[in-house]
Image (cartoon, grey):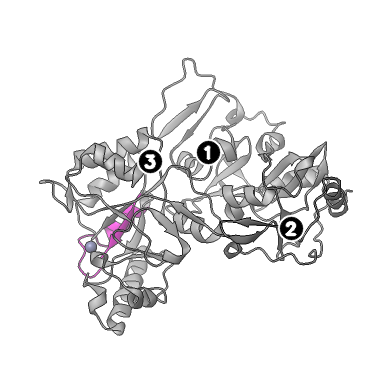
């Protein structure tokens, strides 16, 4: 049995660093270099803290289940769904290379079921947006699992697939589902949560490995002066292009884009390594240390016109998703169409009940526009509606204040650039994509605006 707490302290003393008073000055404010998770009774300190926050947080790695400690000549820490490692000399510093242990490979090392046998396809088939083959391990990755892998860290976090998809019963939960193993993860498919962050859930491989290694997971008391983990202790902002479209069709106009031009733009995004993410993921990254791919893009459609179904299918054919802001009081898209959009993995948001300009309305009418539209959409979908887009991009502080109390997680303006900050949570910026835009100009907006 190990004594991680004491070991860590020894390590720290060895490198001349003392916890927990150390705090780094980052982006003009003091951020802690160690935090405590009271729910599980463990600390996370540098170098693992920055890595945990930047590459996945709670949803991807889960809670710490041990303290950081030395094992086999490395500084390691076990989390529910991962194990992190760094050179022992790195304890307490944020500038150190952190690696994730190949937990998926370790816990399946003994397995020889057919799904784990490499396909060894020669020549390797060329990749499409819907399916990729990895000659590194001889396995394929497709559809929803591929989408999740790209959106949440790819090879750097999960590694390559080491099995094909197959059906398995989780011994811990007793649930039978479609799963796939990766070098550092186990994906589990949850069709009931399609289109949300939880359509794929990760196995507790870190916990499994900790049990195999006999690691001490007993909660420890908080070290003096260490704060509870809270994402708001850290600053967070990022560049994120959020594209705003309206109608789809001919003739091209400010608010109407021909389908061929939209498809050309989607293909450009794919060819240039962009990954569509939902607003749910963008807001998780902003507010809760969730992961965001380096080349993330959000695609949105306003007003809920019928022609947008064409766009939805063009996106689905490319394994991409968008957010559709619907006006349920007058939109052409009703419950059947919206459920079809959701079944393709798209996200539905509210664009108010009647599309009136909100700054011209009394408080009670603004509240009704926001609340009644959310409730109706939720009835149609049987799922929460989390985001709001101001009709006509028309908002001010008063309107934003009312929207923030109507059961949403965030709201979008129609313009304002690409810089996302917590201060702009109720009016994050978008880029209006005029239906006549050239491909060069489109690329400029996505890359440079
Ligand atoms: Zn509109």
From this view, report whether residue 412 is shown above or below residue 124: below
Q: Position of residue 396 (x, y in %)?
A: 32, 73
- Residue for point 39% across, 76% down: 401
Q: Position of residue 153 (x, y in %)?
A: 53, 42
Q: How far apart in space, not on screen, are marks 2 and 1 (Cα)?
A: 33 Å
Q: How far apart in space, not on screen, are marks 3 and 1 (Cα)?
A: 15 Å
From this view, report whether residue 22 is shown above or below residue 10: below
Question: Which residue is labeled 3 in the image?
Answer: 319
> Could you tell whether 146 is left or right of 433 in the image?
right
Q: Earlier in the sequence, mark 3 or mark 2?
A: 2
Mark 1, Cα crowd under 10 Å, few <14 / some 14-19 / many 20+, is some
Residue 202 painted magenta: no
Mark 3, Cα crowd under 10 Å, few <14 / some 14-19 / many 20+, is many
Q: Earlier in the sequence, mark 2 or mark 1?
A: 2
Q: In the image, which disc is placed on residue 209? A: none
Question: Which residue is labeled 2 in the image?
Answer: 22
- Residue for point 38% across, 40% down: 319
Dot 1: element: helix
Mark 2, Cα crowd under 10 Å, few <14 / some 14-19 / many 20+, is some
| Of the pair 379 and 407, the residue shown nearer to us | 407
Dot 2: element: loop
Question: Which residue is labeled 1 in the image?
Answer: 154
């Amino acid at each position: 049995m190990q004594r991680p707490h004491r070991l860590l302290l020894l390590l720290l003393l060895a490198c001349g660093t003392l916890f927990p008073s150390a705090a780094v000055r980052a982006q003009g404010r003091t951020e802690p270099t160690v935090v405590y998770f009271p729910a599980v009774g463990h600390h996370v300190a540098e170098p693992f803290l920055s890595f945990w926050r930047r590459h996945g947080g709670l949803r991807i790695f889960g809670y710490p289940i041990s303290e950081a400690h030395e094992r086999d000549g490395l500084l390691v820490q076990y989390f529910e769904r991962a194990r992190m490692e760094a050179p022992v000399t790195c304890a307490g510093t944020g500038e150190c290379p952190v690696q994730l242990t190949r937990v998926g490979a370790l816990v399946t090392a003994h397995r020889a079921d057919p799904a784990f046998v490499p396909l060894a396809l020669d020549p390797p088939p060329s990749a499409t947006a819907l399916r990729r083959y990895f000659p590194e391990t001889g396995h394929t990755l497709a559809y929803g699992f591929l989408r999740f892998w790209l959106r949440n860290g790819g090879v750097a976090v999960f590694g390559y697939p080491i099995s094909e998809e197959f059906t398995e019963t989780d011994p811990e939960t007793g649930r039978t589902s479609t799963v796939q193993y990766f070098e550092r993860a186990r994906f589990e498919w949850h069709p009931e949560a399609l289109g949300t962050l939880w359509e794929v859930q990760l196995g507790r491989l870190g916990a499994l490995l900790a049990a195999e290694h006999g690691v001490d997971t007993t909660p420890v008391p908080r070290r003096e002066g260490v704060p509870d983990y809270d994402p708001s202790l850290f600053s967070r902002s990022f560049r994120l292009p959020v594209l705003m479209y309206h109608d789809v069709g001919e003739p091209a106009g400010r608010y109407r884009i021909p389908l061929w031009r939209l498809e050309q733009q989607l293909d450009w995004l794919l060819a240039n390594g962009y990954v569509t993410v939902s607003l749910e993921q963008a807001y998780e990254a902003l507010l809760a240390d969730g992961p965001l791919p380096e080349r993330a893009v959000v695609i949105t459609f306003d007003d809920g016109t019928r022609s947008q179904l064409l766009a939805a299918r063009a996106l689905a054919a490319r394994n991409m998703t968008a957010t559709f802001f619907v006006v349920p009081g007058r939109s052409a898209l009703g419950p059947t169409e919206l459920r079809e959009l959701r079944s393709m993995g798209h996200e539905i948001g509210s664009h108010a009940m009647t599309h009136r300009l909100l700054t011209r309305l009394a408080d009670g009418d603004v509240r009704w526009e926001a609340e009644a539209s959310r409730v109706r959409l939720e009835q149609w979908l049987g799922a929460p509606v989390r985001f709001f887009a101001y009709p006509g991009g028309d908002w001010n502080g008063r309107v934003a204040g009312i929207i923030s109390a109507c059961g949403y997680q965030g709201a979008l303006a129609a313009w304002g650039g690409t810089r996302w900050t917590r201060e702009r949570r109720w009016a994050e910026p978008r880029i209006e994509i005029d239906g006549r835009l050239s491909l060069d100009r489109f690329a400029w907006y996505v890359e440079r605006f």
